[in-house]
Amino acid sequence: MSERPLQTLGEFLIDRQDDFQYSTGEFSRLLSAIRLASKVVNREVNKAGIVDIAGAAGNQNIQGEEQQKLDVIANEIFITALSQREVVCGIASEENDDFIDIKCGENGHLSKYVVLIDPLDGSSNIDVNVSVGTIFSIYRRVTEPGTPVQLQDFLQKGVNQIAAGYVIYGSSTMIVYTTGNGVNGFTLDPSLGTYYLSHPNMMFPKTGKIYSINEGNYIKFPQGVKNYLKYCQMEEGDRPYTSRYIGSLVADFHRNMLKGGIYIYPSYSQAPNGKLRLLYECNPMAFLAEQAGGKATDGFRRILEIEPTELHQRIPFFCGSVDMVEKAEEFMRIDSVK
Ligand code: P6P
């Protein structure tokens, strides 16, 4: 019997159009813009070793981090794709100090959506041919429609997200996203340039045996994190667990969602709020995690409930299988009451 044909991302978007009240198709066009941009970035990432676009761009971003040439290129690709289609009224990016006000349509600011994006997360891995990713987060604006966007359109709690997702440029390229009705993964067939639904209704296993953390910082970690790591490494029951750390949030998250696991980027002496950014890394990944039956906290508080104060603020991040995150939180609580 012939197998049911795989559904394309475009068909899926049409089928799920009704997930949005009063949908005007604008949101579907927004996701289509992200889909297009991801294909262009995928092409650039896949030829990084050939064309001299790998390596540092010679300048730094607001994070004081070496901007890789592909960071800059990916940022421009996503901003162009989103701006040209008049589907957003504002964009905030890890690569831009301030948010971008997008004038579109004859009225100037027709769209009701804003996007926050990390255009190429983990880009330092490009030169060593390790998976990297794009992370995106989508909100409805909260300020007056038709007027220029303002900072409060971006400084929204994660619970207000209407969609979030990532692109992983790995052994295959995938888009994984949620609109609040579960998490679905689409794999790109590069010969056709088409994404197909390959991972419907993705779910985090309730527990797992993989922990992802940069143990090079162990000495500087809070005692609660040290105690949790010792727990993971102890010979007892189903432990020791396995340590797997790619140094690319999207790749570590994706593997942990498929196999079960926890990703931790804690605070430590030199990074009192950790390294990851709340708005365009932790909130979108937390939305995905919760929609996939997982959990995401800062070790104490639900990520999605944290009130943002700055565009590029950082936050400690514990994310993955519920049982593993709750066990880590237990060690953090014990340490915090001492
Ligand atoms: P470290 C990449 O720069 C990133 O933001 C995440 O993708 C990754 O998990 C983390 O930082 C790696 O940071 O300090 O362990 O190299």
Image: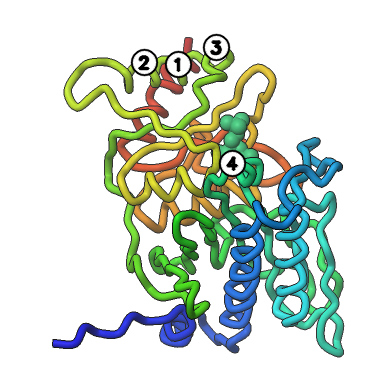
Residue 321 in the image, given as x and y percentages of width and height: 34, 42
| Ligand 1 contact, mark 2 (Cβ < 8 Å) | no
SS type, badge 1: helix
What residue sits 31% from the left and 43% below the top?
260
Q: Quadrant of residue 1?
A: bottom left
Residue tagged 4: 128
- Lower position in the chain sequence, tag 1 or tag 3: 3
SS type, badge 3: helix
Q: Amino acid at mark 2?
A: Lys
Residue tagged 1: 226
What residue sits 29% from the left and 27% below the top?
241
Gap between marks 1 and 4 measured at Cα: 30 Å
In this rendering, is residue 240 above or below 120?
Answer: above
Q: Quadrant of residue 269?
A: top right
SS type, badge 2: helix
In this rendering, is residue 37 above or below 22?
Answer: above
Residue tagged 3: 219
- In front of the other: label 4 or label 3? 4
Residue 199 in the image, given as x and y percentages of width and height: 34, 65
- In front of the other: label 1 or label 4? 4
What residue sits 37% from the left and 49% below the top?
257
Q: Amino acid at mark 4?
A: Val
Q: Amino acid at mark 3?
A: Ile
Q: Amino acid at mark 1?
A: Lys
